[in-house]
Image: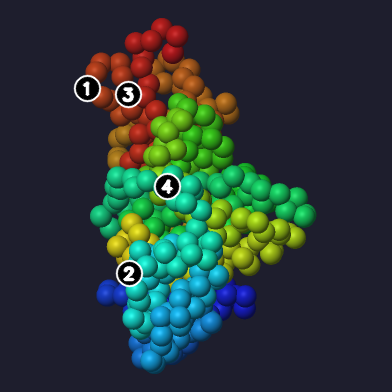
Amino acid sequence: MPFKEVSVMSQREEFARLASQAGANVAELCRRYGISRKIGYKWLDRFSGHEEGWSADQSRRPHRSPGQTPSEIETLVLEVRAEHPAWGGRKIRRVLERAGQAAPAASTITAILARHGLIDAAASAQHQAFARFEHDAPNRLWQMDFKGHFAIDAGRCHPLTVLDDHSRFALCLAACPNETGVTVKDRLTTTFRRYGLPEAMVMDNGSPWGDGPGSPWTPLTVWLLQLGIRVAHGRPYHPQTQGKDERFHRTLKAEVMACRRFRDLAECQRRFDTWRSTYNTYRPHEALDMAVPMDRYRASRRAFPEILSAPDYASGEILRKVQDGGFISFKGHQIRLCKAFRGHNLALRPTAYDGVWDACFGAHRVAQVDLRDPVG
């Protein structure tokens, strides 16, 4: 759909940044953002001529003050901190540098914050550096999870988050009324239409993307396989598998939800949209050497298909359609696989072990059949 009125500036900047990247398909991006090519190239031209703040809220960035004194620098530091209460010295220093200010050292900024009672020394001492691992390019892997739900005046909000592993770019931050597969599919469809498809996605083992440890397939994850997206699940009770998304949740809580009251989901979504733009395009990220996620993100070249096609199978392959309850019949056995594949054909492919077969949905192995097991 066309640019939303509530976040038109941030969406224009996001579009222009993606479209200006090397190798970007401007026509495809225009289609995804619901605008004409004429409009797209107009905003791209304006962006190219005004790299800093061409469409952003100017009040967010400190202004140059020629001949400034140390007290003026301190005022700028406090202004940034007031707008972003969870930011520390390194982030504030980077913001001042981007605005053309002669920024003091991060330690000096931290001292200013401490002097004004804006830093809790005990809380700061608890923060530790973590070893970081990441994929080597955007869209190789997206991490997905629900942030713990919280109360609003009109019920509860369940924030759905999707993060690109390489760039930390927040692809989706949706205020959902529940955590059902139908709701997630709807939000993911909007995200896929905007940014394209990833190669793989990782999620935990709970509903709606899993049915507990050892049961990773649900109608939602089967849909992802149909789109050609590899599905991975984190180890049970090991949230660090999705560490970047977990860290994102902590930032979301500190910068958006802390000490705030929301009337309804619409108000949550407006606040989420505004903050997501700040996070992606303005907030310095320490894991990215103080760059912003948009600096490292590129839209996927794999466009979302509006019509799904059945998986391709080679001629002569052994196919079985999954029946009600998740059963197939094979070599005189009634074998229970997974009811999430009901109505779909699976290919039975032999392995290196006699009597052991892989049950595959297209190129994806989804189960293994052992005919040596008398229970099978």
C-alpha span from label 2 to label 3:
62 Å
Question: Disc 2 vs disc 3: which is toward the camera?
Answer: 2
Q: Nearer the viewer, residue 87 or 354?
A: 87
Residue 272, can we see it?
yes
Secondary structure type for disc 3: strand
- The amino acid beneath tag 3 is Trp
C-alpha span from label 1 to label 3:
9 Å
C-alpha span from label 4 to label 1:
54 Å
* Up/down of 240 relative to 262, above or below: above
Q: Report the residue at 40% width, 39% height from top.
A: 240
Given contact means CB atoms under 8 Å apart, are the residues at marks 1 and 3 in contact? no
Given contact means CB atoms under 8 Å apart, are the residues at marks 2 and 1 in contact? no
Q: Earlier in the sequence, mark 4 or mark 2?
A: 2
C-alpha span from label 4 to label 3:
54 Å
Q: Position of residue 25 (x, y in %)?
A: 34, 75
Q: Position of residue 3 (x, y in %)?
A: 56, 77
- The amino acid beneath tag 2 is Ala
- The amino acid beneath tag 4 is Ala
The part of the image, by quadrant, that contains residue 258 is bottom right
Give the residue number, with chain letter if any, for mark 2.
105
